[in-house]
Amino acid sequence: MIRVPYGLRIHRFLAPKKGSQPGECEDAIAFHAGRMVFAVADGATEAYDSRSWARLFVRAWVRIQPPVFEMQEFEPFVRDLGRRLHRKWSRRKLPWYAEEKVRGGSFTAFVLLHFYIAGVTLHWKASALGDCCLIHRRNLTDCNAFPITRSEEFGSHPILLPSIESKQRRALDSVQHASGVAAPGDDFLLVSDAVGSWFLKQRENGEGETTRLFDRLTESNDADGLQNFFGDLRSTGQIRNDDIAVVRIEVY
Amino acid sequence: MPYVAEISRTNPTCFIILLDQSGSMADGFGGSEGLRKSDFVADLVNKTLHDLVIRCTKAEEIRNYYHISIIGYGGSVQSAFAGALGGKTLVPISEVADNPARLETRTKKVPDGAGALVEHQVRFPIWIDPGASGGTPMCAALSQAKVQLEQWLSEHKDGFPPTVLHLTDGESTDGDPTALGKELLSLGTSDGSILLFNCHVSSHRAAKVEYPSGDAGLPDQFAKTLFGISSTLPESFRKAAEQTGVNVSEGGRGFVFNGDPASVVQFFEIGTRPANLR
């Protein structure tokens, strides 16, 4: 038997935008450490009940074994989820405005990551739609981001995953895929757009001190420290006041 | 930099719609016999309120990002809300949502996802009814708007500045509105001065002027008066204008003269599009 020479340390942080309650956070995180699957989603603020759509999506995705990436599996997977959500809504007696908004459905951005071992090599595979982002660092220096690579690319109107079945196919055509090999010392960040934009800007400006503090706080799973850290960034205008989702996976 | 404050439940903004309901609003656009201006405008204000409510809808909850007043002026100057909101001013959007005067059933065409349109029966809320009587007491209406703005601003010093959308089809019959307009424009929050946008709809056939940056090409003194009390469109509103197909040059003001139905629709769309919803 070949002993797998890898381990994953997982850290997570999820917080609503300033002024909102935790139960109103429209970002969602889910992972299954044993299956090495990780997901972050960011429900669209202006859509209907995006929190439910984002949470349903990530939770369902990490439960599926093997994880679905290919279109022929992914499409029926999201179709069923969308139907499930709309069935839930249709059972309720809704006021006129909710009824109207349900017709537009919900939308979410997402990034999905799966590690698997082939031989003695740790591989990774990712899919993303919209402005959630995967950042892969090697020894915390070399840095590759996917699907967005530069901070200025955030803030546009990305294509998002709709809950309405008839709108899904077009969005799914825009899902992007990436893959690679991981090694001890590698570090993977799955983040929603506010953190992604901030993090890439730091890298572009060569400002390493703040990201080192971010790394230390995530490593120590210091939720209060991270709350204060992002609070400071918000108050100084360095990060947008938005929900925050971070999953950090260290390979050792 | 002004006009960047976030709009949230703890930091809402405010819309005041000033609506000319004078007798001439019973005429058609451009002097035609067709659609009455008062009917068209009432329908458009209801649609605008509908869209504002939808924008604030989260699941079954409405978030109070906006406070709304509608001041109708003509035979009298008063809140134009009908039904349970009658007489009320600066109403939180959740209260607006829950208290239309009535719900009508309308047919709406929506995409079926396969490239075609299908008809749906939808419930459409009505908050205001058409009105057309009396003169054009514009100064009295601006005075009432000022009182409401001062009240609102005293409680919201750092919010996104209020937006006043003023629609009229004729000259003021109770004096020159310039001084009052300037008084309104001197009010504001730490994020900027209030935004006063004016839309004039014509009772005669005449060339329309949209979002000019200067008054040189305006046809008469009344047009220049309204231009003089119109705010420059902030960047986010100019972007909203672009999205509706209107190119507004830098320095362009929230001002339409001799507007037709299409330009009135655009005016309300652009004027109710402050960014930064949180």
Image: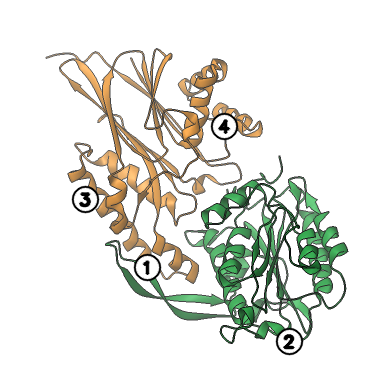
Q: CA distance from mark 4 to mark 1?
A: 43 Å
Task: Give percent across and percent down for residue A165.
Answer: 29, 57
Q: Nearer the viewer, mark 3 or mark 2?
A: 2
Name the residue that disc number 4 marks: A227
> Sequence order check: which comes first, mark 1 or mark 2?
1
Q: Residue at x 43, y 13 (%)?
A: A141
Residue B133 disc label: 2
Q: Nearer the viewer, mark 1 or mark 2?
A: 2
Residue A139 lies left or right of residue B162; in this view the side is left
Residue B8 shows up from this direction:
no
Q: Are marks 4 and 2 on the same chain?
A: no
Q: Are marks 3 and 2 in contact (CB under 8 Å)?
A: no
Task: Give percent across and percent down for residue A118.
Answer: 16, 20
Circle 2 residues within 10 Å: few <14, some 14–19, many ≥20: some
Q: Residue flagged by tag 3: what amino acid is it?
A: Pro
Q: CA distance from mark 1 to mark 3?
A: 24 Å
Q: Is residue A205 positioned above or below B181 on the image?
A: above
Colour assigned to chain A in the rendering is orange
Q: Output the letter for the chain in green.
A: B
Name the residue that disc number 1 marks: B110
Q: Element type at marker 2?
A: loop
Q: Are marks 1 and 2 on the same chain?
A: yes
Circle 3 residues within 10 Å: few <14, some 14–19, many ≥20: few
Q: Is residue B186 positioned above or below B174 on the image?
A: above
Residue A243 shows up from this direction:
yes
Residue A76 disc label: 3
In which quadrant will I find the N terminus of chain B?
top right
